[in-house]
Amino acid sequence: MTPTAAPPRTAAPGPAAAPPRRRSRAFGSATPARTALRYLLLLAVLFLVIGPFLWQLSTSLKSADEDVYTATPHFLPESPTLANYAKVADTVPVWTYAANSLVVAAIAILGNVVGCTLAGYALAKLRFRGARLVLGLFLATLILPGEATIVSQYVTVRSLGLADSLVGVALPGALAMLNVLLMRTAFAAVPPELDQAALVDGANVWQRLWHVGLPNVRGMLSVIVIFTFIGAWDDFLWPLIVLNDPQKYTLTVGLQYLNGTFSANPRLIAAGTMIAFLPIVLVFAVCQRFFFQGVEEGAVKG
């Protein structure tokens, strides 16, 4: 009897092929319309922030023959000139006022960099009795507005014999409580293992501050330098109260003479505004590299 061949096996019916899926957008991705809207909003904000400064720059470069009060103002000057800047320098001692402002800003920056660094490191890394109380007092001073303490500040400066002096102008801003808290936060972000390793190697407090703490908070120091300079350079009320001698005026106080003398000539006022604004741009351009470098490093250097 001959063997019969086995019947061929039939493949089991598999599941039906699924229809092709739509490609879903990644989480957080925006459509082209939303991207265009974002860029439009960014351009609008940029125009609102940078537009006034560009307009002041354009006005300061316009000649006396151009009408700045026309119904259809021209953004670009027809015949740019630097005569307005020269006239401002001839009217008020701009360079003397700028030097006075630089002295005040230098004292304020030095006081904040040194004092806030030491105070912030002590609050973040040192253990002493009453540390929480001191931190609470620092926080309490932030509640008071500057106008509430300006009279007591003037009485203190006058009692120290520093009235009508640049040191008296810079003294109240030479140690800002907000900068102390910023430095404390920056030092607290440094891993404690680094301090412990330095302590095992025999480093004292000053060596730990110089070799471990400061290299990791350079980004925060640049922030303090930038904002302290801007605050000291742009301050108007406090120098106006303290100073009596016109030769000791800071730039912001001295340039107010232009508003009273040349109120009908906005070209000179715009030129004085740009003279006071350009040093701020220069300082930020110099320090912004360290600022963004510290932000990218996360304030801690590995």
Image: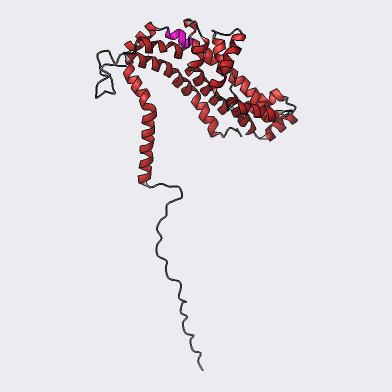
The residue drawn where x is 51% and y is 18% is 232
* In the depicted structure, whether residue 148 falls above or below residue 263: below
Q: On the rendered structure, is 64 left or right of 54?
A: left
Q: For the stretch drawn in magenta, what is the main secondary structure?
A: helix
- Whole-percent x, y for residue 126 in the image: 71, 28
Q: Is residue 241 visible?
A: yes
Q: Is residue 212 visible?
A: no
Colour basis: secondary structure
Task: Report the magenta residues as a range.
Answer: 93-99
Q: On the rendered structure, is 98 left or right of 176?
A: left
The residue drawn where x is 39% and y is 28% is 49
The residue drawn where x is 73% and y is 24% is 204
- Whole-percent x, y for residue 171 in the image: 58, 15
Residue 95 shown in magenta: yes
Q: In the rendered image, which quarter contains the C terminus? A: top right
Q: Quadrant of residue 273?
A: top left
The residue drawn where x is 46% and y is 10% is 97
Residues 139 and 183: in front is 139
- Whole-percent x, y for residue 106 in the image: 54, 15
Q: Quadrant of residue 177?
A: top right
Residues 176 and 257: in front is 257
Q: Quadrant of residue 214?
A: top right
Q: On the rendered structure, is 191 left or right of 86?
A: right
**Residue closest to the far bottom:** 1
> Number of callouts in the render?
0
* In the depicted structure, whether residue 69 falls above or below residue 249: below
- Whole-percent x, y for residue 283 in the image: 48, 20
Residue 120 shown in magenta: no
